[in-house]
Image (spheres, rainbow, N blue to C red):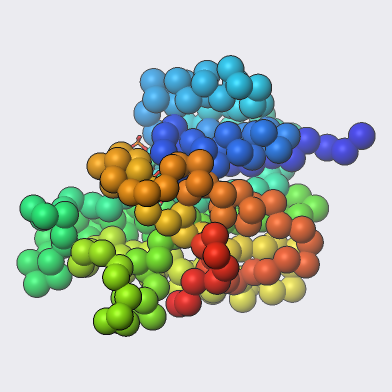
Amino acid sequence: MSETMIALVTGANKGIGYEIAAGLGSLGYRVGVGARDAARRETAVGKLRAVGVDAFGVPLDVTDDQSVTDAAELIERLAGGRLDALVNNAGISGEMDPGWVQDPTALDLEVLRTVVDTNVMGVVRVTNAMLPLLRRSASPRIVNVSSSVGSLTRQSDPDIEIGPIMAAYAPSKSFLNALTVQYARQFARTNILINAACPGLVATDFTGFHGPRTPEQGAATAIRLATLPDGGPTGSFFEDDGIVPW
Ligand code: NAP
């Protein structure tokens, strides 16, 4: 009998992360629901279990070293010392100016610091803490949930409609994309595949529930990348329609 695959999704209590957890669960993965708030975490775990997902709660604030260390220890204990898929989904836009913009010429450095701490350093913190567990998998997969607003090619093309100026959020996703490439280079001679995923514009808390896509649709690319076959792509940036240019 094949072993049950184990996944951890950060920021899985709601939105796209919740649907990534649900999708992996429906594929038979045992899913760690990474979430910082106890009540929101337990509610999400309960909802997932109610639809048949083998879910367990993982207290996890991606900005907190101790919380991340404790999360790795919990997974080590509860999931047999192994992790097959890590989805770094937790992310924030940071405080927005009126009109839902972040003007670079008036950017509050604390906002920038908080966004980078969550969207960039949080991913490094969690990934590196989980690596010993991932290295014990036969087919480790890491997915960084990014955004096409992190695409410098698209941001600098005047013919592409890419939404408001977001001087903290958009560069945090460019930074995350750049990190994804460095990890892929480091993993080049290993069985670890790491890619970035853009969910598209999804109606969640993040967007004030504006956007044409459902969280389930937004989860699809991350689920595909978390379940890539051996020999699949690595060090790339994907959306539903294919590769997103850097
Ligand atoms: P969301 O509904 O606001 O969910 C964000 C999740 O991240 C929540 O579970 C939140 O937990 C968690 N989170 C935030 N800071 C955290 C921290 N320090 N530690 C642990 N968890 C933390 O947003 P979403 O739309 O699903 O976004 C998920 C990802 O998709 C993000 O990385 C976002 O940048 C990306 N994305 C979204 C869109 C879109 O259109 N929605 C487009 C492109 C990319 P709490 O409930 O505790 O706050």
Q: Position of residue 19 (x, y in %)?
A: 52, 38
- Identify which residue is drawn at 73% across, 34% down: 28
The relative height of residue 5 versus residue 136 in the rendered view (above or below) is: above
66 left or right of 111 in image: right
- Identify which residue is drawn at 40% across, 66% down: 148
Q: Where is residue 106 in the image (x, y as percent from the top left)?
A: 7, 67
144 left or right of 15 in image: right
Q: In which quarter of the image is the C terminus?
A: bottom left
Q: Position of residue 145 (x, y in %)?
A: 47, 55
Residue 5 in view (yes/no):
yes
Q: If the picture is divided into quarters, which one holds ligand 1? A: top left
- Identify which residue is drawn at 57% across, 68% down: 242
Which sits in the foreground, 189 or 219?
219
Q: Position of residue 231 (x, y in %)?
A: 78, 67
The relative height of residue 91 versus residue 19 in the rendered view (above or below) is: below
130 left or right of 81 in image: left
- Identify which residue is drawn at 33% across, 55% down: 117
Residue 75 in view (yes/no):
no
Q: Quadrant of the N terminus?
A: top right
Q: Total marks drawn?
A: 0
The relative height of residue 114 versus residue 68 in the rendered view (above or below) is: below
